[in-house]
Amino acid sequence: MKLTTKKLESLIQEMMGRRFTQEQEQKILGLIKRSRNLMLDLQVVQGFFPTIINGVYFYDKEEDIQKAILNTIRSSHVKKDIMKHYAAVQNIANILEELNQYLVLLTDLELEPGNLARTTKGLLFMGLFGPVTQGTSHSIKLDELSDMVNTGIMFLEDIESAAPGYFGDGNMGFEYMRDIADSFHNNYSDLFDYLERVT
């Protein structure tokens, strides 16, 4: 269920400023479950952040990084990992784009202290991680996901800069995907901070 901005505004207006009816609580639980499912979808994204990224940015000097990028794109066996990473970043951005709507809505609803707020906190902030990095098998914490996506996009931008057209023609959407990840970080933190105050 994708929510448009109008539907979000309508739900907020319908539910704000008064206690929730049982039907409204069921709608909110549906949003919480959908949010959790999207977070679980993040855990199964494959090919994100291959070890080559750490190898490239191991260097301090810009010229050494540029050499590492050029060596990377010359290696045909690495291209498969780079393209998997690119697809993973796109997949993560698509998941986060939908998830952002629900996190904003749940924050704006100002859940009162009680079962619903505790349920939200338990389901969305306990025991969940983002994708596992390719090669190192590191489970990314959700509050660190934005930084990892930003570095992953910087890697893709550096490759595209060194070899224009590496990912095809047209706009790769790097800035848009970065904005989505940054918004997720803010929305996730805002909801967590709110729930910390009321639970």
Image: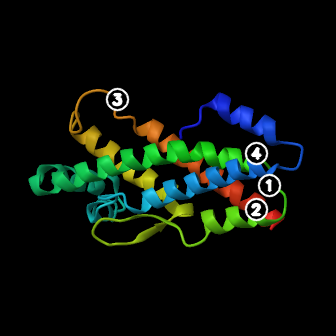
Q: In the rendered image, which quarter is residue 190 located in?
A: bottom right
At x 89%, y 45%, the residue is 18
Report which residue position mark 4 lands on. Answer: 108
| Residue receiving disc 1 | 111
Examine the rendering and report whether any part of residue 153 can be seen.
Answer: no
Is 165 left, or right, of 3 in this rendering? left
Q: Amino acid at mark 1?
A: Leu
Mark 4 to mark 1 CA distance (whole Å): 8 Å
Report helix, strand or loop for mark 1: loop
- Extreme residue toward the front, this view: 23
Measure the alpha-carbon separation of dots 2 and 4. Answer: 13 Å
Q: Secondary structure at mark 2?
A: helix
Kind of element beneath mark 4: helix
Is residue 46 at all visible to an observer of this figure? yes
Give the image quarter of residue 43. Answer: bottom left
Q: Gap in Å between the C-alphas at discs 1 and 2?
A: 6 Å
Q: Position of residue 158 (x, y in %)?
A: 31, 45
- Which residue is more in the foreground, 163 or 173? 173
Using the numbered discs, state the Cα–Cα distance from disc 3 to disc 4 in whole angstroms.
34 Å
Three-letter residue code for mark 3: Asn
